[in-house]
Amino acid sequence: MSLVASLYPALKPWLFKMDAERAHEWTTRMMRIANGFGLLTAGQGTLRQSPVECLGLKFPNALGLAAGMDKSASAVEAWAALGFGFVEVGTLTPRPQPGNPKPRLFRLPEHEALINRLGFNNPGIHSAVKRLEKRRTKAVVGVNIGKNFDTPNDAAVNDYLYCLKVAYPVADYIAVNISSPNTKGLRELQAEDSIRQLLAALKKEQASLQKEHGKKVPMLVKIAPDLEGQQIEALARVFNELALDGVIATNTTINRAAVAGHRLENEAGGLSGAPVRERSTQVIQAFRMLLREETPIIGVGGILSGAHAVEKLNAGASLVQIYSGLVYRGPGLVGEVLEAIP
Ligand SMILES: Cc1cc2nc3c(=O)[nH]c(=O)nc-3n(C[C@H](O)[C@H](O)[C@H](O)COP(=O)(O)O)c2cc1C
């Protein structure tokens, strides 16, 4: 186990006394500093690696950091040093934006869950791209893109096209986020006609960028766990029709059944962690049945142990990602997942 992973259990009670967003900022800053001194890799020589080929890319291993943890691409090297095989940065929007008023991130430790309504606080796509141009890591880097909060849905396509163009030269893959519950109306883009229009435009742009840059950057769509059977079928139909490169399932949920009675139950936002695990796995299973065989799924939602990661792979995911698990279990979860997955 790495030095930081063994320190986390001692640090956690202190971090959990801090406001959740401050704790997040503090740990990211400390990680960058620790990585500068080579401390993140210290004692970690034993981390198991099983390289995976997926999306036409070589992943050092199948475990990724989910979007939202590194919204500004400020610590990619540090995440890679912790053992992640890939890092999805963002969500990034064309223009920088501050996100929703604070407080906007809450812990529900009794449920090993988080509720967030950050609202795409981010420094803008250009700032992230500048950082990514300088990266030296072997980890695969995905760039997750969205729309600015004040861009109406009927102009959303312009924001996504803009981000795709700007990120294309530096991204290993692009994740089109249409499933955050914290940007008004965003999830309506998951409706069949809207998604067909949006993705058709993005696929066309992807093809012309492929010619221009001489490389294909795969494009995936990140979906919500709160989709009904018919909506899942409609989305899969569109994804197959347009030969989408991959699907990321799932984002956070607006369903509160699993945390009913909790004092924070009625905080607006997306719920993540243990309560979303089962639903996200079901959505992965459903998409696996409906998607073309060659379309991979990245499984995310409630992975808090190695066994949970295996569950996602068994449901049909080719790669997995974690966010909330890192908060509750610390960096030791990275090693645990890498040991558990085939
Ligand atoms: C605080 C927080 C911020 C997030 N921000 C984003 C985001 O900007 N874009 C995105 O696609 N997903 C975002 N997510 C969703 C995660 O990437 C992930 O899909 C979700 O939390 C389920 O995984 P988990 O249970 O392992 O946390 C965020 C999640 C959390 C908890």
Image: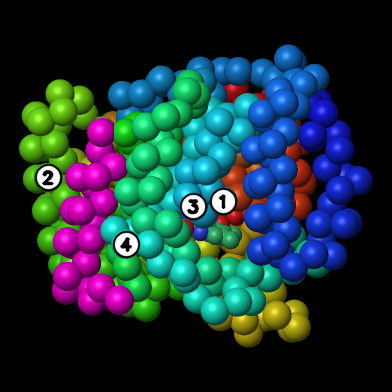
Q: Name the residue under label 3.
A: 71
Instruction: Give the mark, 2 or 1, whose residue is nearer the N terminus.
Output: 1
Q: How far apart are marks 4 and 1 (CA)?
A: 19 Å
Residue 205's tag is: 2
Residue 95's tag is: 4
Instruction: Give the mark, 4 or 3, whose residue is nearer the N terminus.
Output: 3
Instruction: Give the mark, 2 or 4, whose residue is nearer the N terminus.
Output: 4
From the viewer's side, name the closer residue of 162 and 36. 36
Q: Is the magenta stretch mostly helix, strand or loop?
A: helix
Q: In which quarter of the image is residue 165?
A: top left
Query: Mark 4 or mark 3: which is in front?
Result: 4
Looking at the rendered structure, the secondary structure element under dot 3 is loop
Mark 3 neighbour class, 10 Å CA radius: few under 14, some 14 to 19, many 20 or more:
many
Q: Name the residue under label 1.
A: 69
- Is the residue at mark 3 in contact range of ligand 1, meaning its CB lies under 8 Å from it? yes
Instruction: Reply yes or no: does residue 162 show up in magenta.
Output: yes
Residue 139 in view here:
yes
Question: Residue at coordinates 60% horizontally, 35% vertically from top-left?
Answer: 79
Q: Distance between the residues labelled 3 and 1?
A: 6 Å
